[in-house]
Amino acid sequence: MAFKKPVDENSELGKLLADGGFLKIPKVSDVVRGKVLSVSRREVRLDVEGMTSGVIRGRELFAESAFYDNLKPGDEVEATVIELENENGDMELSFRSAGQQKAWDELRRLFTTSEIIPAKVVEANKGGLLMQVGHVTGFLPVSQLSPENYPRVSGGDKNKILEKLRSLVGMSMDVRVIDVNENEEKLIVSEKSVWEERQKDLISRFRVGDKISGEVTALADFGAFVRFDTLEGLVHISEIAWQRIDHPRDLLKVGQIVEAEIIGIEGSKIFLSMKKLVDDPWKKIQEDYKIGDTVKGRVLKINPFGFFVELTPEIHGLAHVSELSDDPTIDINTLGKIGEEIEFKIVSIEPKEHRLGLSLKAMNAKPEEVKEETEVKEKKSKKTKEEAVEAVEVAKEVKVEEVEEEKTKAE
C-alpha cells in the first residue's frame, strides 16, 4: 500500500477539506465511484465523482473481481482510497479491496441462485481440491466430486487417493457454490451437485426392476461400478453372485460388459443386482444334496473358525472348526490346504439362509452316529426357533396387558 502524506493545504483538495464545502470528502479506506478516463498496462485513471482525478497503478491494479479485467474509457467502477493526494495531486486508489468485496458479493449471489460456474483445479491435498473461482480460491472436498472424478481406490490407500486427485490439477470443472463465508474466507464448491442435477432427467427414465447392460468402470472392496446410458450404478458385492466372494475382482474386471437389474434409486444413486438375473441355485439344493451325503469340495479359504469349501461354482459350504476334528487343540492348517480337494459329510442344509454345513470328522464316524448327531442339532435348532416365537408372543401379550392397564387408569 502506498505511503500516506499530508494533503497540501494550498491545493484545491486541501482547500475543500479545510472549509468543508458542500461535497462529502472521502477518507482513506472509503470506497468511491468514478468514471474511467484512460486505461493502460501500468495505470487506470478515473474521474472521481466529479471532484478530483484518481489513479490506480502498480499492484493496486490487480483485483479479485473479474469486473476489472477489461475496463475501457467511460466505464463506471468502484475503488478504495489509499491516499487522498499523491505526488502528482491525484487521489491514490486501489482496485484490490473493492474488487475483493465485489468478488465475495458475487459468490454470495451464486450461492443464493445455485448457479453453475466454471472453476479451475489449482492444487490437491488428501481432503480434496483447491479451486480457482474467479479471483478467489475455494475448496472442493473429495465427497463433492462427481462419480467420474471420484478417486476409487481399493482399500482406501490415502497416498493413491492423493495421486489420483493430483492428476486433476489444471482441469476445469463445472461447480456450484454450496457454502460461502467472507469473514472466515471460506468458499466450498461442489461438482457432485452439478452432476446430480444433470442426471435427473436421465434417471427419471428408469424404474426399479428395469434390466440394463453396462460396462464395469471400477472395482472396490464393497462392489463394482457399472456405467450405462451415461449413468453409473453400484453393484454391491453381495449382489454380484449367489456364492460368497472375497472381492469383486474374483468374478469381474474393468471394461467387462455385464447385465444387471435396477433394485434401488435414491436421488442420484442407482443400485444394481447381477445375481437377480440368475436363478437362485439354493432353491433346488435339496434335490441335489441330502444330509449325510459324502461330497468332494475344494478348500477356498481357511479361517480360524473353519474351511470355506466350494462344491460347485454356485454352491459353497462351511466346515466349522468343531466339525474338522475331535481334538480341540489341533492346528486346522494341518487338515487341509487352500485349493485342495477333500471329502466331507453334509451335516446341515439351510436353503433360505444359503448355508450348507460340512464335516470332516464325520467321515470317520459310523453312519448311526452321524444320524444321531444331526438329529440332535436339528432338535436344538427347532427348539431355539420355537423359543424365539414364544418370546415374541409373550412380549405381545405383555404389551397388550400394559395398554389395557393404562386404559383402565385413564378411565
Image (cartoon, grey):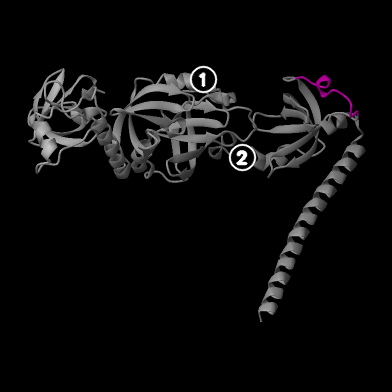
Return the x and y of residue 24 as percentages of the image width and height.
14, 41
At x 84%, y 48%, the residue is 380
At x 17%, y 30%, the residue is 84
Tag 2's secondary structure?
loop
User: How crowded is the residue under tag 1: few (<14 C-alpha within 10 Å), some, or many (20+)?
Assistant: some
Which residue occupies the foreground of this view, 373 or 135? 135
148 part of magenta stretch: no
Residue pointed to by mark 2: 280
Return the x and y of residue 20 as percentages of the image width and height.
12, 41
Numbered marks: total = 2
328 part of magenta stretch: yes
Q: Is residue 55 left or right of residue 248?
A: left
Task: Tell me if residue 185 comes above or below residue 379 in the rendering.
Answer: above
Q: Main secondary structure of the magenta part?
A: loop
Which residue occupies the foreground of this view, 181 or 284? 181
Q: Nearer the viewer, mark 2 or mark 1?
A: 1
Q: Is residue 107 left or right of residue 249?
A: left
At x 40%, y 30%, the residue is 139
Per the rendering, the mark at residue 160 is 1
In which quadrant of the rendered image does the N terminus lie? top left
The three-letter amino acid code for the residue at tag 2 is Asp
Using the rendered view, name the quadrant where residue 351 is placed.
top right
The three-letter amino acid code for the residue at tag 1 is Lys
Which contiguous range is marked in magenta? 327-337
In which quadrant of the rendered image does the C terminus lie? bottom right
Return the x and y of residue 162 as percentages of the image width and height.
48, 21
Task: Tell me if residue 285 comes above or below residue 409 in the rendering.
Answer: above
